[in-house]
Image (spheres, helix red, strand yellow):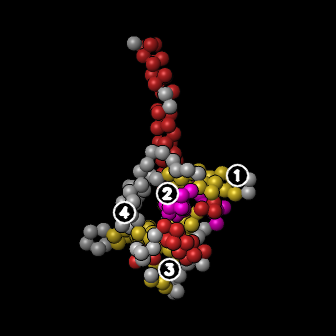
Amino acid sequence: MKTSSQNKVADPISSPELIGPEKIRLFEDILNGGLTLRVKVTGKSMAAVLQGGELLTIKKTPSRSLHIGDLIFFKTLYGVPMLHRIVGKHREKDMFIFQTKGDALITMDQPVPEHNILGKVCRIEKTFSGGRTRQIEMESGTWKVINYFKAIIGLGRSKVYTLLRSGLFSSFRHVIKKVFI
């Protein structure tokens, strides 16, 4: 594992021998220690924003500072690390509960309690063919607006899908056919 005290960055990418709970504990220790975490994207659930292979810089962020549209790194109820977008946030008793969803997915994840959130993506580094790289600062005003609209669109897609699957749409279609045909 490479660490840099100058940039306060820990890079566990080169530690493939760590698995499951050990990896989560390492991530938590790094982020809770005031360091930022760099991880490589491996999945496709966040396509088209993340295709796989990008390097993400993640930092610990208080739950009250997380907003709809933010990309968060969290552990699922089964302890699996995941990175998805916040599409909803509400307060339940004395804690925040977040609704998340992968951009490329139709359905939403199980609600995420604030104590399962490891951190928030603050930078994306994309490498293109020819070795050219681009850094996206996710905390810039422009990207906050873009991410907010991506969350709203993703939430809308999920709700339309749920409506279509519920049978309500087929009942409505049946009424339309009787009236107009």
Residue underneath mark 2: 84
Q: Nearer the viewer, residue 23 or 101?
A: 23
Q: Residues within 10 Å of mark 3 (few under 14, many from 20)?
A: many
Query: What's under tag 3, amino acid-wise?
Result: Val
Image disc number at residue 9: 3
| Amino acid tagged 2 | His
Q: Name the N-terminal-most of marks 1 and 2.
A: 2
Mark 1 or mark 3: name the one nearer the start of the chain. Answer: 3
Q: Secondary structure at mark 1?
A: strand
First-in-chain label (1 vs 4) = 4
Q: Amino acid at mark 1?
A: Glu
Residue 33 visible somewhere in the drawing: yes
Q: What residue lies at 50% left-to-right and 79% top-to-bottom?
A: 9
Report, in whole angstroms, how far the alpha carbon at label 1 lies from the one at label 3: 33 Å
Question: Residue 56 at x, y = what percent?
Answer: 45, 69
User: What is the span of residues highlighted in magenta in the rendered image?
Assistant: 62-82
CA separation in Å, label 2 and label 4: 13 Å
**Residue at image point 35% right, 72% down:** 133
Q: Determine the CA span between mark 1 and mark 4.
A: 34 Å
Q: Which mark is residue 52?
A: 4
Query: What is the C-alpha distance between the residues marked 1 and 2?
Result: 21 Å
